[in-house]
Image: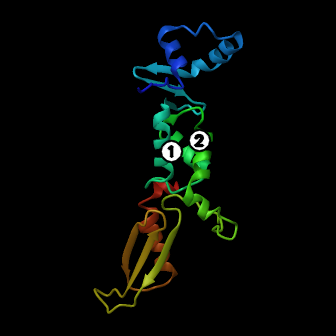
Amino acid sequence: MLVKVAPWYAHIANYLVTGEVPSEWKTQDKKYFFAKIHAYYWEEPFLFKYCADPIIRKCVLEEEQQGILTHYHENACGGHFTSQKTTMRVLQSGFYWPSLFKDAHTMCKSCDRCQRVGKLTRRNMMPLNPILIVDLFYVWAIDFMGPFPMSFSYSYILVGVDYVSKWVEAVPWKHNDHRVVLKFLKENIFSRFEHLFKI
């Protein structure tokens, strides 16, 4: 005969629906229960929890917990990460149960593939280099192309490329000197984007 076990949140759901707590509870049990009950709300047939980061997560039944952990640890979206990372992925997906951190740790400890690989050492890690943060049209690469066979008395092409957006400006010129570059900047770059440069 199959016996159905009540979920871990049965008392919380019963209280939210009926407003009653089990009569056999001691004062200390009731005090602990009422301290945490404000974070839960019942939306038939699911129980949700307002977590510390202001995200509402669905409370998961015991029989679903292992499947969720397996999915976020081993399947295509997993990657056999540590217990902390697996737990974060479960939480980011909107699931919650009280023993989540402990269950993820137990699962990662019992995962055969994770135990064979081991941890990353300092020798395996990539060096961390700072990333230069630039906005649109702040950093340009400007260069001459040519000389080409003369066409309409032009033999050079001045090319300007924005590093961020990869926007390209190409203009034909007769000469390749600093005056051409200044004129190019004035006419093609600053005039078109003066609202960005506040000129």
- Please state which of residues 159 and 91 is positioned toward the viewer in this rendering: 91
Tell me the residue at 44%/59% (across/down): 193
Placement of 62 over or under 33, stated as above or below = below
The label shown at residue 97 is none
Left or right of residue 39, residue 18 in this image: left
Q: Is residue 33 above or below residue 111?
A: above
Give x and y (percent) for residue 40. 53, 22
Q: Residues within 10 Å of mark 1 (few under 14, many from 20)?
A: many
Q: Is residue 3 visible?
A: yes
Q: Is residue 108 left or right of residue 161?
A: right
Residue 12 at what x, y percent from top left?
A: 54, 18
Q: How is the image coloured?
A: rainbow
Q: Earlier in the sequence, mark 1 or mark 2?
A: 1
| Residue furthest to the front | 1
Type of amino acid at the residue the image marks with label 1: Leu
Q: Nearer the viewer, residue 138 or 180?
A: 138
What residue is disc 1 on? 69
* Residue at the spot 59% in from the left edge and 32% down from the top edge: 98
In x, y percent, where is residue 75? 44, 53
Q: Dots 1 and 2: beta carbons under 8 Å? A: yes
Foreground residue among 73 and 129: 73
Q: Which residue is mark 2?
A: 103
Q: At numbered mark 2, what does the secondary structure look like: helix, strand or loop?
A: helix
Q: Where on the picture, by quarter, is residue 189?
A: bottom left
Residue 135 in the image: above or below residue 56 = below
Question: Vertical placement of 5 versus 186: above or below?
Answer: above
Q: CA distance from mark 1 to mark 2?
A: 8 Å
For the N terminus, the image quarter is top left
Q: Of all residues shown, which one is farthest toward the bottom?
A: 149
**Residue type pointed to by label 2:** Asp
**Residue located 46% across and 19% down the image:** 42
**Residue 199 visible in the displayed image:** no
